[in-house]
Image (spheres, coloured by chain):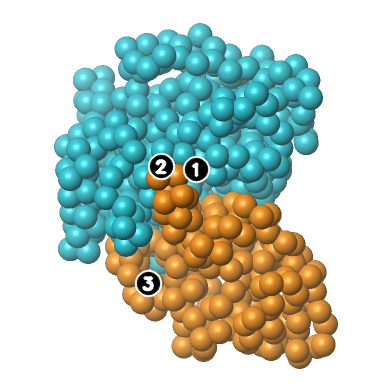
Chain colours: A cyan, B orange
Amino acid sequence: MGMTMTQKILAAHAGLDSVKAGDLIEAKLDIVLGNDVTTPVAIDVFEKAGFDRVFDKDKIAIVLDHYTPCKDIKSAELCATARNFARKHSITHFYDVGQVGIEHALLPEKGIVGPGDCIIGADSHTCTYGALGAFSTGVGSTDMAAGMIAGENWFKVPAAIKVNLVGKFNKHVSGKDVILHLIGMIGVDGALYKSIEFAGEGVAELSMDDRFTIANMAIEAGGKNGIFPVDEKTLDYIKGRFTRPVKIYEADPDAEYEREVTIDLSTLKPTVSLPHLPSNTKTVDEVKGMPIDQVVIGSCTNGRISDMRIAAEILKGRKVADGIRCIVIPATQEVYMQCITEGLTEIFITAGCAVSTPTCGPCLGGHMGCMAAGERAVTTTNRNFVGRMGHVKSEVILASPAVAAASAVAGCVADPNDLN
Amino acid sequence: MVQGKVFKYGDNVDTDVIIPARYLNAPSPAELAKHCMEDIDADFVSNVKAGDIMVGGANFGCGSSREHAPISIRAAGISCVIAASFARIFYRNAINIGFPILECPEAAEKINAGDEVTVDFDTGVITDLTTGETFKATAFPAFINGIIENGGLLPYLKAKQAKEN
């Protein structure tokens, strides 16, 4: 029996010729990641267990992105703990305010992760790097500590779901609509413990930023990871960024998939997820007109330069509607700078948006855009759970940058295709 | 063997309701325990007693990777979680900190809130003393038992390194 892409990467990192779904293996790690929320907990267990050395200072990334610039004294203490640890162990890939970006936009951009890698991160959206053809999965703080100590960790080899992409996008449809549609189709536990393997001619239609957005939300279907084949677009993206040798893995023709689904990109419409589960999807034309109070454009899901360009194209020459707070957060310093040099920042500010330094902030109800009881937001983030962006009685509607920007202008949930 | 009163919740209990992100800036177990489940069950923290048992539906612990979630449940006094299924990061995190969790769809369906339940970790047998029903949870693979027997992933790793040196 052949192997999926995920299974091949895991086998190679476990030093095995082959693996099959269900096998328990110990695999070598290329990168171990943590942020300001999860790293301090990892440091605590690392030190309490009596360890004093990391396996490789070049293979650990610590990114202070969630509550930074620090929102309060407690957050500052967490960052200080992570910062001191990074200094003590001379961690190469340590990112603090001024250099930091949202981890899952930052690591690919800096070339820290690349095709064929085996990566764990103490953040559930670590699955983002599957867009590059890597095996990458979210874990907790103890797993991060174990990874930092041993450079390896245990995995159960996942069974797979294959998602065949065909066709081409219509106007105002993007990667976000693909992944929301898929989660709506298979449910929030539709890929539980499994890998989601994207394939088909439609992959070539997707930009790298679309692929990052799609892989990012594999976890929202319960997936262990999401993964894309490596093609010219991948190799173009990593050029000048990723300096380690590139390893390209391809699924065997006879690889086993528990389930196969096909998504025809040409049939997709702009899609949203209503509160309080990402699987609660509707096409935007079914729900347009719902009143809103806030719009957030950013996050590890949709804070990259293509997302900013899409939002700016809609906001150019228009105004954010009265009574709507529109917060734009470029995901990294590089994206922020591009927004300035391309004139996007001016468009956002002229339209009446607040433009923030990179932070995860509002996505998890941390800071920079929490909501009060009874308020509702359209956001380009990844979760709409109860209380996710603030008060337990506030609501989040997940959407693409195009829908979010159109909604900011309309003052309610809006279809970008309806804009004059 | 543990025994306690059951706190029961539905499907897709996510880590944001187990411990909201607004409390993640103070990660001590005692501090996290004060806010456990408050967004879906404001009375949980005042009603739970040491040894009590949490029962959930499918995909328990979905969402973020925060290990603060199983830490807060344990620190609140819960002795184990029984669910129809667990989200995979929560599952790993619970095992890695040595907190017992049991997958048992039948028990998750039939046990009622407030029932008195015992769990025998050696046999995986769950007994609902209130209704008299018994259930058998899915056994852990030997590898995972090794981690739990060592008291978590890091002690397991420490023991493994000691053996190699």
Disc 3 marks which amino acid? Pro
Disc 2 marks which amino acid? Ala
Which chain does tag 1 point to? Answer: A
Q: Which residue is mark 2?
A: A150
Q: Which is in the foreground here, disc 3 or disc 1?
A: 1
Q: Are marks 3 and 1 in contact (CB under 8 Å)?
A: no
Q: Which residue is mark 3?
A: B29
Say which mark, if any, is on residue A153. 1
Q: Give SS at disc 2.
A: helix
| Residue A342 in view (yes/no) | yes
The lab-note entry on whether marks 3 and 1 share a chain reads no
Residue B23 locus on image (x, y percent)? 35, 67
Residue A106 locus on image (x, y percent)? 33, 32
Q: Are marks 2 and 3 in contact (CB under 8 Å)?
A: no
User: Who is closer to the viewer here, A196 or A384?
Assistant: A196
Instruction: Please identify the quarter of the rendering in which residue A112 is found.
Output: top left
Q: Are marks 2 and 1 in contact (CB under 8 Å)?
A: yes
Q: Which is in the foreground here, disc 2 or disc 1?
A: 2
Q: Give SS at disc 3.
A: helix
Q: Is residue A146 above or below residue A419?
A: below
Q: Which is in the foreground here, disc 2 or disc 3?
A: 2
